Image (cartoon, rainbow, N blue to C red):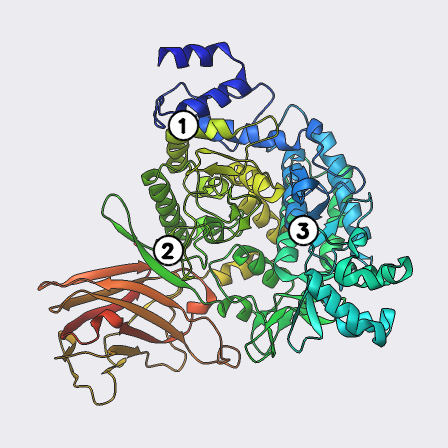
Amino acid sequence: MSIVANALEFFGRPERRLLAGLALAMGLVPATASAAPPEIEPGFRFPTVPEEHPHARALLANALKYIGPENRIFDPASGYPFEGWNQDPARGIYLRSFTQLTAIGQGMEILANVAAGVCEAPFVSRREALALLGRQARTLLVDQSDPRLSADGLLGNFLDLATGRRLGPLTTDVTWDKLAAAIGAGKAEAAWRGLEAKGWITPRKDGREAAVNRKPGFGWEHFNGPLEAFADNATKQKIMDVLDERVVMTVFVDNANLSSSVARCLGALLRPEVAEDPEAVAIRKSLETFLERQAEGYARLYDPAAGQFYFGRDVTHDRLFGWNDLEGKWVTGHVDYLVNEFRGPATFIVLRYGMPADAIANLGFKMKPYRAADGRSRHVLAPWEGSAFQGLGFELTMTELERPSWRRLLEDFVDVEVDYSTRHGLPGFLSESYSGRGEQYTGSIGIPEVTVAPDPRITDAPSLYTIGPAYAVSPARVEAFLAAQWPLIETLQTDHGPWEGYHATERGPILFQTSAHTFSLILGLLGTASDNMKAYLESRGLHENLERIFRPGAGADLLAEPAAVFAWDAPANPLTSRRDDQGFHVASPKAAEPGVAFVAPADSGVDLSGTVLSLRYRLKSPAAPAKIALKPVKTETNSAAGLIATELFVELAPSSDEAELRIQLPATPGLARIKEVVLSLGPDAKGRPLELSILGLAASPPR
């Protein structure tokens, strides 16, 4: 150990990190070894991050280096941030060749915080931040008016920056009709077959539509083999013009991320330190104009029949996003799940543009139990893919921490992330990211226990970016986690900010950096998002509308009369039930698919938004996994088939005494009019005896 310590003392900072990583990999230094708190270089100032959290401050300072001028992360022509640090054409990695809307908005937020004096770094002054922010705002207005880059006020989700001017992305789809129009129907049949044989296209549906596959061996220089007959320059040019068509794709989530970031920029520029600055005033005018011009686009992406937003629109081909079902029929996709990173941005769009609250109310969700190392079970909102950023978002933006229900749910979610990572020695949280498996970027990284999707999860590729929003939720808890994991986290830091994360199996850094993730880490640690959003909403007179979205319900006693209660099982399966002054009792010698429904007496249902659901019961038969479905009053929009059901997954433990399950529900319009609460037992109960008494089912405000 003394040799390692002496070596670390001798070498400079980058080499110290390398040697520290080697020492950890060799088992010479335990990951929880105590050390002096890290210090940050002069010139950084973070008023929102307390001095007693040195690890959070050090991580923030390192992440901010990503925007240092020597790293040239901002495109000089547009001011937009590049997609990421990595640029390796030989491996097909071009993160410095394009940008995307979420990163643009987040980068603007960081600059607005610097301009407002909330964050200081030695390499960017407040005046420089304002100047760059102004350039970005002007570019947004220009691009918003360019039909090659936008439609109905909404920008395409990706912008190509490789040529020094903004271009839309290359198409991912091609049709036989378009190829035939370019080279003639006679040639098109053979060329289409040749493109398929080369692997450049994958036909689908009736074979006259195909996905374009850009991979090594694709393009102008490779018209050989099956495509040799079309190798003359004129024909090649026509075919490549079809395959490399530039398109405009307006995606709801990406635009909502950008719009809500723009709103928070406006909120930051309303702070007294900068509000009267003429340059800030001009930027606010430009950004407000940008938001105003988006109204038509968001209206077009709202589906009044479903009461939900569409995923997006392929403007070039005039088609809503979706997929072909097994019968080849096009199915349009909607934004339909609550526990996702777009929860906050979608709420902002509803508020800013006066759109129906159905777009939030019709988002279903699941809750799943997680048993921590201390033996305590927490019922948490379950991300579809188990990804931490789906549960936390890129930032906490809509004053969630001022809402008792959301604070509790988010704190529990952070506890689960910290518990899992601590137990498995992960210096970060499991979240959508680069996996460390070659160039793979995937959403299949998450905690299995809280994942809805049935596919296996990757559990050895923790990333750093969700530490930001987690810190905004539970600063002390996350600071303690950072302190314990610091020997590993420090090895991920570079002069251009921290790497994506850590490959726990190979015991080394994941050598990627994306702007959206690095910016999310910065903004989460700063923790200014909700305050800036609140300032903007108040400036627009929208704060009361926000309060209505989060308004908690009064709750209800769903076992007391006049509420109706009834039980059922499979047809012809014996089941008895009775109701008395002690509760509701169900028994069966051999259960099949038993369930109990509690039906609210009023046509308007009961308001369970933000309440704690308490189920008191006694189970004299074996343990029974179960789920509780919360079914809303039927409306024109939520009656459509395909909406995701809201369900709480629970486990009923056998006991001769009374047991109780208490589950915190989120404050959301989707729980404001619940007609039925349905308890159904899982397949484990099938064929087994059942003796269950429901002694109480009530919802009440949080204690």
Residue 477 rendering spot, x and y as whole percentages = 37, 37
- Closer to the camera: disc 2 or disc 3? 2
Residue at screen point 24% across, 78% down: 594
In this orientation, does residue 197 appear? Answer: yes
Q: CA distance from mark 2 to mark 1?
A: 30 Å
Per the image, the residue denoted by label 3 is 101
In this orientation, does residue 247 appear? Answer: no
The kind of residue tagged 3 is: Leu
Choose between 522 and 318: the one closer to the eye. 318
> Could you classify mark 2 by the number of other residues whose Cα lies within 10 Å: few (under 14), some (14-19), or many (20 or more)?
many
Residue at screen point 45% across, 57% down: 385
Residue 241 rendering spot, x and y as whole percentages = 83, 60
Residue at screen point 63% across, 56% down: 254
Choose between 186 and 46: the one closer to the eye. 186
Above or below, comparing residue 647 to residue 39 in the picture = below
Query: Split into 4 quadrants, where in the image is the N terminus?
Result: top left
Residue at screen point 60% across, 71% down: 323
Question: Mark 2 falls on what kind of element?
Answer: helix
**Label for residue 474?**
none
- Closer to the camera: disc 3 or disc 1? 1
Q: Residue furthest left?
A: 656
Per the image, the residue denoted by label 2 is 450
